[in-house]
Each structure stands twice: as structure tokens, then as C-alpha cells.
Image: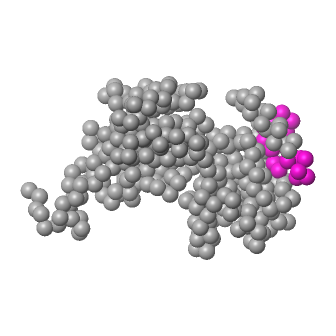
Amino acid sequence: MNLKQRLQLITDHFPDSERMGFSGTQELENWIVSELGNLDVLEGPVKTPAGWQRVRPVESIYHICAGNVAVSAETSLLICILLGSKAVFKLPSSGLPELEARVKRLPQEWQQQIELLSEHDPERMRSCDAVVVFGSDQTVASVTSACRPQQRVLRYGNKISMGVVTATGATEAWARAAVQEILAYQQLGCLSPQSYLCEDPGAVAVFAGLLEEAFQELPTEQEGISLEAKALIFDARQRNTANGDTVCVPRAEATWTVVQRRKSRLTPGPGFGFIEVVPSPAAELPGMLETWRGKLSSVSFSTEKITSEEWAFWEDYGVHRLCRMGNLQRPPIAWTHDGRPRLADLVSWTYADPDLNLG
């Protein structure tokens, strides 16, 4: 199956493409070009100003899937189809019904190239050319140490994301956008916002109130929330109240929680709609973020434009993606997860000098 056919297979079998970060074949092609320079390098040698080049994807990839966000595993499946690589998925103990159903809908020839494992198989992992691991920092470290030196290992450990409420950004529209990115995937992935930082400390109460109103507009929903999760939410509310912060539960029995911080500090919650609004004057922001340097994934802004100075500031703390508020959980397919390409790290290049003719 050539590249064109594989791209068509993806568009046919990922009808929820917007959820995956693309809207058609053209965006997939743009992604390939952005990482590999040319569509044709996946099909055969291509003459470039620097010489002849060809890409060869890894033959097999072992994926250790996260249990909290199924879309990460589904994107891994998409990448395997795009590259034409065989795939082994080690599923979490709870399973991944979305991924399993998607695999069953694929043509038989592709189902034969995909294995779904309920138990981790270290030897099977070591036999693959590449390993993609999602999980805690401890899981990532353990898996990495068990891999062969020659294997490609793509690691995605613990990170958090947050939003910045600009001086004029404490509005109803931005609060509604924030609630959408808070609630996506039960606020459990690395792109889930944990905090909203108010440049103007006086806007903390205003934005927190607007978040509460936006939460009130949504139905109370606790389906799928375990007793353990409810206990974590209750404990977090109690601790934050004891610390002297204002804790608001927009509706009885809801898991959503809005915390108004008195002091400029970051304290991520248990997920499930638990969010803090924090005073973050410019003079105190570096001190707040220093502990989190290198552990920040993405930042959303209540504005449609940022300055190059703002870009450089967040980049210095290890942030790899900036977006408009509301879009944290909807990255484009071509985004560089944790600052690394997702296709280019799974291929090898063959090069021939420009003065060697290819007949």
C-alpha cells in the first residue's frame, strides 16, 4: 500500500479527524512535508540541493498506552498507518475500547499488522525497532532502562498545562472557552489546564466567578467518576479550604471546583474539573514557575496575539506549545509533542552524494 493509499485509509477510518487534529488529507501531507521535507521521500530517492535522500520508516513500534487519554494511543495508530509500520500496543489494565474498536474497523491486511496486548511483554518490546511510552516519569524511566541502545524511544512523561488570563482577558467568552479545555478528557492529560494565571491580581475573583457561571450552564455529570476519584476531589477541596483559599463548587454533587488563590503559587488538583485561578503579577511569575521548569507542556492565552517576548519567556521554562484559550486539548496533528517531531523520530535517512547519478 503506497503513501497515497495509506493517507486515504486514515481519512476513511478516522471520521472524527477534527478530534485528531486534522481536517483532511492535505493537512496530513503538510505534516509530512514539515517533518520530512518532501512527500516523495517515503516512496523513493528524491534529488535535493544537498544530494539524493530517501526515508525508511521503522518496521515495528511498541506502544505503551496511557490509561487516561485514549486519543494518544489512537494518534499512535494513525502514525503507524501513515508510516506503514507494524504496531504492538500494550493496553492499560482498564483497556482502551476506543482503540480496540478502531482497529477492528480497519481492513484485514492492517489488522494483521497490529497486536493488542493486555500484559506488558518486555521481550516483544525489545524486538521492535522503536518504543513509544506514555505514562508517569517512573514508568518512562523504567521502560527506557529496559530498551536496547539501538532502539528509538519516544518518551512522554508527567507534564501539566495552564492558561494565562491577560489584563483584558477576564471575559465571559474566554471563561467559556477555558471551561471547554478544562473538561476535555476529564482534565487528566498533559494538555489539561491545571491553573489560570491572572496578570492582574484584581481579576482573580472576576475570572473565577465567570468560570463558575460557565460551569453552571453545564449538566451535572458524574458518570464514569470512580469512588477513588471522588475521594481525591473531596480531599483537595478540604485542603484548599484549610489553606485559606476560596473554594467554590458551582453545583451540588458536581465534580467541578474553582479555587481562588490568595497567594501566587501553583498547586495542581486531582483533575475532573478542579481548577485554580492564581494571581500572577509579572514580578512574581518567574518564582512561581521555576519549580515547574521543564514540566510545562502547553499554555493557552485569552488573546489572539502574543509578543515575541512572551514567546521567549515561556520557551525558557520548557513550554513547547502556545495557543488561544479553548484550544489546549485540540492540538493540530503537526504539533511537536514535548518539543520533538513525531514522524521524523521514527524514520531513518539514506543519503547519496549529489554527484552520484541515479539511473
Viewer-side residue, 250 vs 189? 189
Q: Position of residue 316 (x, y in %)?
A: 59, 67
- Residue that lies at the very extreme toward the left in this rendered image: 359
Q: Residue at x 11, y 58 (%)?
A: 358
Residue 201: name its quadrant.
bottom right
Colour scheme of the picture: one colour
Q: Position of residue 24 (x, y in %)?
A: 43, 47
Q: Position of residue 14 (x, y in %)?
A: 45, 38
Observer able to see residue 12: no
Query: How many marks do you count on the picture?
Result: 0
Asked whether 54 falls inside the magenta stretch, the response is no
Q: Residue at x 34, y 57 (%)?
A: 36
Q: Residue at x 77, y 65 (%)?
A: 280
Asked whether 258 falls inside the magenta stretch, the response is yes
Lateral position of residue 181 relative to residue 13, left or right: right
Q: Position of residue 215 (x, y in %)?
A: 78, 45
Residue 256: name its quadrant.
top right
Locate the C terminus and report the quarter of the image it occupies: bottom left
**What is the magenta range?**
240-259
On screen, residue 34 above or below 147: below
Lateral position of residue 150 relative to residue 264, left or right: left
Q: Residue at x 87, y 42 (%)?
A: 238
Observer able to see residue 242: yes
Locate the N terminus and report the quarter of the image it occupies: top left
Viewer-side residue, 13 vs 342? 342
Viewer-side residue, 14 vs 48? 48
